[in-house]
Image: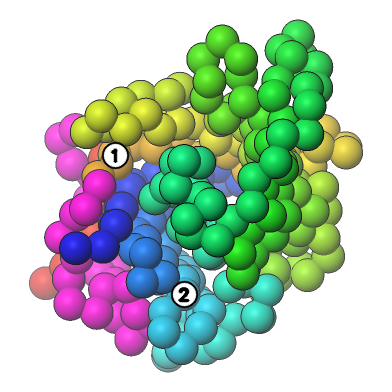
Amino acid sequence: MGEELSSDVQITEKNSKQQAHYSCTDSPAWRIDVYAEGKHVFCEGLDAAGPWLWPASDSSAHDAVPDAKKTGIEGIEFNLYGLHRFPARGHVLSLEGRELLDGTDYYVIKAVMKDSYETYLYINPLSWMIERRRDFRAFHPDIDPKKAYAEKRYADFRSVKGIVSPFSEKQMNWKTGEEVNSTAVRSLAYNPRFQPGELTRRYRAPVNLRASDNGSFRPKAAN
């Protein structure tokens, strides 16, 4: 069996809050379905045919820009694997020294990702958690291809099935200090059961969303 993950998250961007369901597998494939006020408004992902996106106003999905594949693969690798697995997966890690940021003297690890970006990981020497990740890329390749100095800040680390993961993420432009968006994880599952074809562009996600008792979000099929 391959490696798989799914999570329900709340995304805040430009004072707007949206719910989303993210899934990925090591095939590699990923998909995110975004809901606003309980209605499906957007989805995008990566399948065997490449990166794709599907605004709710369109009748079907269409190809995304090629650079979106790199962003998706980077997300899959960091969501599914620890750094100890990276060399075997073709990624090159090297220690770049230390860097003091906001009072923490981080270890800085350079990661040259196979089929993706070059990125820098900032490891807290007390917790040994990756608390920051920096690279130079577009935040939303299909909307604005302009590259920026992107930083992700991770916090609220929790254990799920013995795996420690951040439940809070802020995406920043680390040159300007501007917050681009933030993500709060509501639920996280490893090796979940997917619907047939769920991680492909042909799959139609439910149009409505309901809140579950445990605070996570689940799609609800239309009547």
Q: Quadrant where the C terminus lies?
A: bottom left
Disc 2 residue type (three-letter): Leu
Q: In which quarter of the image is residue 114?
A: bottom right
Q: Quadrant where the N terminus lies?
A: bottom left
Q: Residue at point 53% right, 79% down?
A: 51
- From this viewpoint, is residue 33 visible? no
Q: Is mark 1 on a helix, strand or loop?
A: strand
Q: Give the range drawn in magenta.
A: 190-215
Residue 84 in picture, x, y percent from top left: 46, 41
Q: Quickly name the residue at label 1.
A: 187
Residue that extends furthest to the right in the rendered view of this protein: 175
User: Secondary structure of the magenta portion, mostly?
Assistant: loop
Q: Residue at point 69% right, 60% down?
A: 117
- From this viewpoint, is residue 102 visible? yes
Q: In this view, does 95 lie to the left or right of 80?
A: right
Q: In this view, does 48 lie to the left or right of 191?
A: right
Q: Quickly name the residue at label 2.
A: 46
Above/below status of 194 relative to 202: above
Q: Is mark 2 on a helix, strand or loop?
A: strand
Residue 48 in picture, x, y percent from top left: 41, 84
